[in-house]
């Protein structure tokens, strides 16, 4: 399960710097902490009210009537809370430039302004239609076969389409009116689609005035869109699978565990199993929810637009091979033991020690996602994070995730060496080493991508070590 979670990428979308030297991303963790609290609060609320079964109610109105919609509603609530928190933070960070009125409105060219806003809305609607058509026809996602794995993703797409039809135009108008940003316009996927549509028209008609010019910036837009299209479905189904476990564990902690301990029948073995399962559910529900917000939301209101995406084939390969469906190609990795196999040991203290180290490592991993706030995304450059775990090493998520795997998988390999056979143990060790190498290459390709950003160079001067403070 842990291999399905994303490891964060440090980048820079050109973070604003105050005269004091503070970067706008330095306190992005505030939004992340609020998001983590929102995840736990939603889990508590859902458990105490039976929301998964009974549905979500607001002011007496029933908003959802099934388990899937109620779980998606939790994602929407968590994301809304994070976005509101980040808006408030950015407002206080720089009130003077938070709002930037469009020059067309200043010049009272209202018709031109609203015409451009309507075109932008229509282009986004067309782009959304293309995205929906792609997922409905791509065999991997199984829409036509009604495959259950991505059912939540298609339900989310339906909600997005309905939501954009109603709220898309007001959002576009408000954004273009009060968040004027020519640089953000150049990274706008809708305007790229408009230029792509204009290209064949210019070719057929010979109208040079509408013939678009394409540049490296347009390639960045396409790569950023591909990142979103690949990871958002995964993060959606990961959360749908994980969050109900968190809800159940909240109930277990509040209702069942105290009685089990008081009865005197609570064994060390049961404690190890509970510690393992509950920790995983808490850590990865928070991690995936925060990551989902970063992948889904790309807005100048929260200053998390993508400045660039990984340009190299190698960078893409070593990243996406860690996620479905490409995990199947890491055959050696599947020969390594699962994380839960550490629970097979007879020595319960040994299990406690290794599980504790794993949990501590995963907390570091989750904290790396938390420090991004709404800027999290693999393969992209959305803002340098230089505080929290990133103040000590450049790749805390990769380092901690690999340490966690070695903590719980290598002891299981030793167990298999004595109970199953040395050949199996060797193959499992090679599989674990392969995953470590994959993550090392992810770190190297990310640094090569980000080295084009001067602010990342400044960050590297501050933080010299990649994986272990003071060592490497």
Image (cartoon, grey):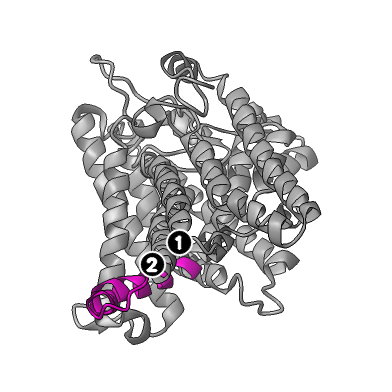
Asked whether, in this view, residue 323 is left or right of residue 355, the answer is right
The image shows residue 56 at horizontal and vertical percentages of: 30, 78
Classify 198 as above or below 142.
Answer: above
Question: Which secondary structure lies at badge 1?
Answer: helix
Residue 191 lies, with reference to residue 279, above or below; the image says above
Q: Can see residue 310?
A: no
- Whether residue 422 appears in magenta in the rendering, the answer is no
Residue 463 — which label?
none
Q: Quadrant of residue 440?
A: top right
Q: Which residue is mark 1?
A: 348
Q: In this image, 84 relative to 74: left or right?
A: left
Quarter holding residue 50: bottom left
Residue range (magenta)? 241-268
Q: Is residue 230 left or right of residue 465?
A: right
Nearest the eye: 208 or 16? 16
Q: Which residue is mark 2?
A: 268
Q: How many labels, in total? A: 2
Q: Residues within 10 Å of mark 2 (few under 14, many from 20)?
A: some
**Front-lying residue, 185 or 220:** 220
Q: Residues within 10 Å of mark 1 (few under 14, many from 20)?
A: some
């Amino acid at each position: 399960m842990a291999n399905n979670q994303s490891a964060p990428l440090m980048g820079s979308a050109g973070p604003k710097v105050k005269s004091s030297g503070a970067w706008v991303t330095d306190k992005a963790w505030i939004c992340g902490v609020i998001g983590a609290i929102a995840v736990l609060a939603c889990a508590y609320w859902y458990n105490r009210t039976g929301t998964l079964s009974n549905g979500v109610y607001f002011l007496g109105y029933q908003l959802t009537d099934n388990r899937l919609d109620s779980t998606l509603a939790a994602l929407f609530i968590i994301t809304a809370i994070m976005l509101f928190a980040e808006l408030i933070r950015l407002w206080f960070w720089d009130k003077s430039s938070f709002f930037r009125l469009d020059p067309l409105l200043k010049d009272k060219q209202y018709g031109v302004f609203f015409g451009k806003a309507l075109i932008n809305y229509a282009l986004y609607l067309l782009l959304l239609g293309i995205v929906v058509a792609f997922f409905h026809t791509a065999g991997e996602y199984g829409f036509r076969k009604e495959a259950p794995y991505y059912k939540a993703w298609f339900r989310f797409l339906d909600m997005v389409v309905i939501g954009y039809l109603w709220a898309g135009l007001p959002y576009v108008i408000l954004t273009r009116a009060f968040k004027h940003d020519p640089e953000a316009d150049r990274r706008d996927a809708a305007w790229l689609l408009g230029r792509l549509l204009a290209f064949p028209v210019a070719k057929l008609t010979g109208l040079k005035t509408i013939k678009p010019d394409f540049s490296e910036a347009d390639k960045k837009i396409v790569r950023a869109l591909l990142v979103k299209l690949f990871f958002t479905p995964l993060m959606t189904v990961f959360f749908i699978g994980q969050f109900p476990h968190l809800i159940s564990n909240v109930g277990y902690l509040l209702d069942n565990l105290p009685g089990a301990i008081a009865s005197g029948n609570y064994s060390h073995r049961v404690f190890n199993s509970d510690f393992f399962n509950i920790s995983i559910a808490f850590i990865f529900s928070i991690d995936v929810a925060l990551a989902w917000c970063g992948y889904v939301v790309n807005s100048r209101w929260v200053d998390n637009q993508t400045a660039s995406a990984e340009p190299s084939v190698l960078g893409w390969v070593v990243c996406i091979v860690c996620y479905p469906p490409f995990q199947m190609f890491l055959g050696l990795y599947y020969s390594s033991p699962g994380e839960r196999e550490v629970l097979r040991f007879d020595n319960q203290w040994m299990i406690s020690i290794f599980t504790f180290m794993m949990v501590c490592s995963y907390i570091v991993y989750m904290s790396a996602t938390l420090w991004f706030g709404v800027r999290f995304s693999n393969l992209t450059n959305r803002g340098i994070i230089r505080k929290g775990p990133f103040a000590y090493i450049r790749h805390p998520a990769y380092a901690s995730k690999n340490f966690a795997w070695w903590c719980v998988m290598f002891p299981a390999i030793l167990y298999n060496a004595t109970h199953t056979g040395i050949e199996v143990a060797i193959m499992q060790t090679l599989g674990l080493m392969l995953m470590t190498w994959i993550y090392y290459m992810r770190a190297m390709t990310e640094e090569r991508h980000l080295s084009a950003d001067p602010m990342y160079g400044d960050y590297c001067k501050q933080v010299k070590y990649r994986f272990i403070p003071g060592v490497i």
